[in-house]
Amino acid sequence: MRSEWQMYKEKQIFYCDYTRIGVEELQAEMDEVDAFIGKQPEASVLMLTDVEGLIGSPKVVEMFKKSSAHTKKYLSRSAVIGIGFSGPKKILFDLVMRVSGAKVNIFEDAQKAKDWLVAN
C-alpha cells in the first residue's frame, strides 16, 4: 500500500497517495485503504487524499463514490489536493461529494491541507 500514516504537529494524518496511478492500480490501492480505514474507530481519522496527476473517468468517479461512502463515517476531517478549484476535476469531485454524502475540503497544497486537518 502506497498510502500511509504521517505525523504532523504531533497528530497522525492518513495520507492517501493516489498520485499518477492507473485505474487498476488505483482500484487495488483504494481497496487496501478502504479496508484499513474501516478498522479505525468511527470519526477518528484525519485524512489527506492526493490525486495529483490522476486521470478522471466514469470508472474512477464510481470508484471514488464507493470509497467515499464507505470511509466517511471513520473520518474526523478530510482534505484533498490535486483537484483545483475549477475545471473538469472539480466538477467530478462535486459529483462524488453529492452522491456519497462525504464532506471533503479542497486545498491547493499539502501544507495548507495539513494545517486545516490538525486545527481544532
Image (cartoon, grey):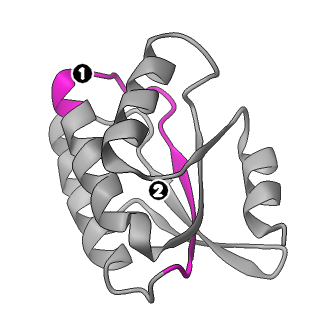
Q: Amino acid at mark 1?
A: Ser
Q: Where is residue 114? Give x, y as percent.
A: 75, 57
Picture quadrant where residue 82 is located: top right
Marks 1 and 2 sit apart, C-alpha to C-alpha, by 19 Å
Q: Nearer the viewer, residue 91 or 37?
A: 91
- Is residue 43 depicted above or below 48 in this figure? below
Q: Is residue 71 magenta?
A: no
Q: Is residue 52 magenta?
A: yes
Element type at mark 1: loop
Q: Amino acid at mark 2?
A: Cys
Relative side of 110 to 34, left or right: right
Instruction: Tell me if residue 52 can be seen.
Output: yes
Which residue is label 1 attached to?
Answer: 57
- Is residue 91 depicted above or below 45 in this figure? above
Relative side of 111 to 33, left or right: right
Q: Nearer the viewer, residue 96 or 98?
A: 98
Residue at 80 percent of width and 49 percent of height:
111
Classify mark 1: residues with Cα within 10 Å, few (<14), some (14-19) or many (20+).
few
Task: Tally the marks.
Answer: 2
Picture quadrant where residue 11 is located: bottom right
Which residue is label 2 attached to?
Answer: 16
Q: Quadrant of the C terminus?
A: bottom right
Residue at 47 percent of width and 37 percent of height:
51
Element type at mark 2: strand
- Please report whichever mark, 1 or 2, sits nearer to the chain's N-terminal start: 2
Q: Where is residue 95? Give x, y as percent.
A: 37, 29
- Is residue 82 depicted above or below 120 in this figure? above
Q: Where is residue 67? Give x, y as percent.
A: 28, 55
Relative side of 56 to 74, left or right: left
Look at the image and give the residue range highlighted in magenta. 43-60
Q: Where is residue 2? Give x, y as percent.
A: 40, 59
Classify mark 2: residues with Cα within 10 Å, few (<14), some (14-19) or many (20+).
many
